[in-house]
Structures are given as C-alpha cells and as structure tokens.
Image (cartoon, rainbow, N blue to C red):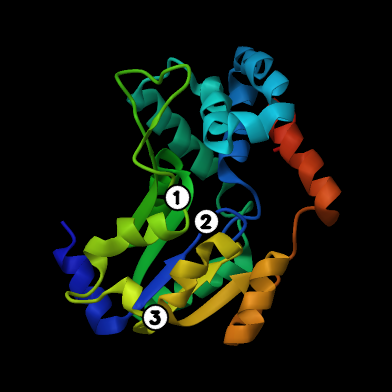
C-alpha cells in the first residue's frame, strides 16, 4: 500500500502538515459539528448530555468527553458520514483555510515531496480534506463504526496525537529509519501549531510553527524553526473560545 509513497519520500523528502489551527484556524470537529447541526437541528439535543459534564472534564477525562461530544453524529451510518464530510469540505474550502499555509503546501508538493496530512482530528474529516488538497497520504484518529455510529463512539487505537502520529506514519518512512534514534529525515519539512507535535517537528531537517502556543514558540526558538502568523479569524483567546462554543451549539455563522 505504501510502496510508491515510501520511494517518493526517500527520493524527494517529506512534508508533514498538522490540520487543526495549522492548515485551518479552527478545530475541525467543532466546525463540522456546526455544519451538521445547522442541517439537522434536532441533533443539538446531544448538548443535553455533553454540557452537564463539561465542569467535570478533569474527572471524566478528555478522551471520554470527546466520545460524549460525538453524540451529535449518533445513528449515522458510514455512507451518511462520508457524504456529510464531503459536503463540509466543499463548503469550507478554500475560504475557511489559512491561505498562507495552503501556499506553503503547494510549494512543497511542487518540489515533489511526499505530502502527509497527519492530524488528531477524526479520519472521516481528514480523508476528504487530504483528497481535496491533493495530499499523498493522510492519518487521523479512526472511529469505530459498527454499521451506525454508537451513542458514545470508540476509536480504533489511540488518538492520533504526539508520538502516536509517529507510530501511524512508520509504514511511509524509509527502510531502516528509526524515529527514536534522533536522526532526521533529510530535505523534509514539518508544520504545526501545537507543542504536542514536537516529535513530528523534530523528525524533519526543517520545521515551521504556525501561530504557535507559547510552549511551542519557546521550543521553536531553541531549534531555529520558522514562524508563520497568518491572520486569525478572531482576536484573543476569549473571542476564539466564544466562537468555538457557538460552533459546538450549531449557531456559528458560516
């Protein structure tokens, strides 16, 4: 499955891109929630389960909260999910994406690098976005779908985040390349906004950080990574949080 991709990466190098707040300034699952609820308003009722648990996120744990959050997709089958995801991508691309980062992706693709979209977001969203933009490979968090999505859907394996991204991408790395050895992939470039992606950023000879978290900015300065600050759709953390809340309630203007 990965033979052609691996040889391309070995020859021309790799270009790894995160998705949320890197290629797109939002958290994709929240934006998708807004998209779905606007078309299926009764699905807003999932909030009756999600909102009461929000103050107890440290007790319930973030992974379990994500399972509760996905209640707005309860009962949909794989075909319905894929159709909604395709409509979602068509609706939001390119106007909802960071134009500057999309141009960087295009530059990397023209250089012949193996382009990889690797995100913690759900693969039902990562796949159509990757295909729309023309990525060679994609990796996301995989949902377990048994005919129809359960009320509290589980994931297949771990959330595709941090070192788990590296594990998922092992099949496309050159033969004999050991990510834990400290070696870097030559002529390769990684892009992300979050310090959770430091393992992926350190894999490459070059790295760029996009509107980085404070922690990531400090790490980037030590390594001499490039910094990109495309315009944000909101000003300040408070306004961003309000916008995310509206997306989760399905009342954010599209």
**What residue is pinned by disc 3?**
188
Crowding at label 1, few (<14), some or many (≥20) Cα neighbours within 10 Å? many
Relative side of 218 to 65, left or right: right
> Residue drawn at (30%, 18%), measured in percent from left and top?
147
Above or below 236: residue 90: above
**What residue is pinned by disc 2?**
19
Q: Quadrant of residue 153?
A: top left
Crowding at label 3, few (<14), some or many (≥20) Cα neighbours within 10 Å? many
**For the residues marked 2 and 3, what is the alpha-carbon distance in whole angstroms?**
18 Å
**What residue is pinned by disc 1?**
129
Q: Earlier in the sequence, mark 2 or mark 3?
A: 2
Instruction: Please tell me whether mark 1 sits on a helix, a strand or a loop.
Output: helix
> Residue drawn at (47%, 16%), measured in percent from left and top?
151
Above or below 207: residue 142: above
- Tell me residue 28's x, y (percent): 57, 44
Q: Earlier in the sequence, mark 2 or mark 1?
A: 2
């Amino acid at each position: 499955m990965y033979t052609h991709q691996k040889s391309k990466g070995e020859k021309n190098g790799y270009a790894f891109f995160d998705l949320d707040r890197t290629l797109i300034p939002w958290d994709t699952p929240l934006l998708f929630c807004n998209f779905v609820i606007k078309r299926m308003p009764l699905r807003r009722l999932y909030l009756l389960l999600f909102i009461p648990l929000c103050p107890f996120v440290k007790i319930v744990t973030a992974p379990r909260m994500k399972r509760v959050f996905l209640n707005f997709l309860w009962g949909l089958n794989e075909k319905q999910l894929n159709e909604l995801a395709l409509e979602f991508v068509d609706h939001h691309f390119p106007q909802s994406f960071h134009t500057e980062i999309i141009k960087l992706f295009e530059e990397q693709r023209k250089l012949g690098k193996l382009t990889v979209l690797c995100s913690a977001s759900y693969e039902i969203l990562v796949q159509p976005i990757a295909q729309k933009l023309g990525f060679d490979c994609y990796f996301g968090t995989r949902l377990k779908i048994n005919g129809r999505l359960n009320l509290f859907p589980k994931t297949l394996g771990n959330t595709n985040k941090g070192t788990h991204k590296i594990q998922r991408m092992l099949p496309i790395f050159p033969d004999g390349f050991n990510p834990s050895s400290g070696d870097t992939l030559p002529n390769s470039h990684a892009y992300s906004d979050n310090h959770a992606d430091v393992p992926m950023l350190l894999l490459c000879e070059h790295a760029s950080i996009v509107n980085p978290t404070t922690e990531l900015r400090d790490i980037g300065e030590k390594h001499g990574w490039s910094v990109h600050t495309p315009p944000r759709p909101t000003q300040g953390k408070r306004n961003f949080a309000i916008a995310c809340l509206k997306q989760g309630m399905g009342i954010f203007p599209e």
